[in-house]
Amino acid sequence: MHILGIETSCDETAAAVVAETDMADRPWQIRSNIVASQVAIHREWGGVVPELASRQHIRDICGVVERALADARLGLNDLDALAVTQGPGLVGSLLVGVAFAKSMALSLGIPVVPVHHLAGHIESLVLEHGELPVPSVVLVVSGGHTNLYLVPKPGVYRLLGRTRDDAAGEAYDKVAKLLGLGYPGGPVIDRRARDGRDDAIHFPVARMTHADRKAPALKGDLDFSFSGLKTAVARFVREREHVLPEPMIADVCASFQRSVIEALLDRTFEAAWRHDAQGVGIAGGVSANSRLRHDASARGQQVGLPVFVPNLALATDNAAMIAAAGLRGYRAGVTAGWDLNADASLTIG
Ligand code: KG4
Ligand code: ZN
């Protein structure tokens, strides 16, 4: 079985073909994985401009899909199903993918499987490493989300904690902007932090102890908060009248990064301990971070837990993960009607 995945939730137009294998523990194989990034367009504005993003998706999507099929050496009639990101994300961007997928599926007479973007990030781990040991705790950490999930069995995701304000990737992007380092902030802070001292400046990170008013079912102590950290960096920069020597910029990057990563890993390993997890996964754009990858594997070794991260191409937004989650959904009997619509605030768990 071959499925074509389509992902247009934010600023990457992506299409990929994933095939089913006959191995239960390694269920999927990537046949092609194409991403057209819009970073160059949004960089000029210091962040993603939704209107520009949706227009660019319209320009790119046909070419990206054609390329994904060509790389997989398949024709349209070799496809058995389509998977598309239904949400969450920017509604105008999502609509392009959803409308395209429905039209293509209707014309080919094949089903469409709706996929939650974060389920895609979680399944990127399975795509690369095979089925995770269960239960696993998976941190999904991206530009729009910082969510901690329990995966009690393959394909089931239970939300344990989430950010109350900024996502970790958003904090990276905002701090990079404050330091005049450009967009996106994650990769550049990651790089600049290597030359800095991570104990040079003490930036506090809030620890949540009270229940989340917006999600009362969550106890709250596995939640995150990064807006105070961002404000602390803003104050530090303002107090120096926005002129920081190069070595100090590196120190700010290293100290900020340490605070974010300690907060992420403290809660993740706390959750793993509480739920007697057999493995820890970290997925989403921020999982590309070199220190997060290094520290996570060191902590995993300390407590004897395997740690799974995706390779860099599967960490940031891509359609192979959407196709994989689509295959999971399809085998569980999930397909959409022709009234499928984009849902900017779709939730799971
Ligand atoms: O998953 P993703 O590609 O898109 C969303 O679903 O949001 O994540 C993008 C986010 C951006 O905020 C970007 O700054 C961050 O991932 N990111 C990183 C790194 N590479 C990308 N953050 C920290 N370190 C990195 N190396
Ligand atoms: Zn993402």
Image (cartoon, helix red, strand yellow):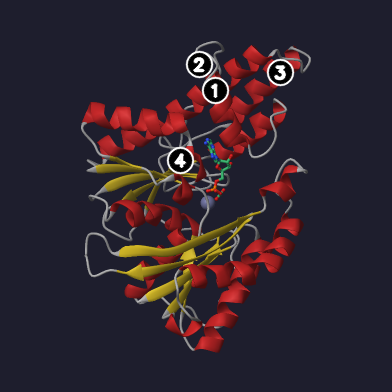
**Based on the displayed image, in which of its 4 quarters is residue 35 positioned?**
bottom right
**Residues at marks 3 and 4, CA–CA distance in whole angstroms:** 27 Å
- Ligand 1 in which quarter: top right
Q: Nearer the viewer, mark 3 or mark 4?
A: 4
- Label 2: few (<14), some (14–19) or many (≥20) C-alpha neighbours in 10 Å: some
Looking at numbered disc 2 in the image, what kind of residue is underneath it?
Asp
Amino acid on which disc 3 is placed = Val
Residue 200 in percent (x, y) is at 54, 10
**Label number found at residue 193:** 1
* Residue 322, image x, y percentages: 46, 63
Measured in 3D between alpha carbons, the distance from the residue under mark 2 to the one under mark 4, in whole angstroms, is 19 Å
158 relative position to 141: left or right? left
The disc, 1 or 4, on the residue closer to the chain's N-terminal end is 1
CA gap between label 1 and label 4 equals 16 Å
- Mark 4 sits on what residue? 287
Which is more N-terminal, label 4 or label 3? 3
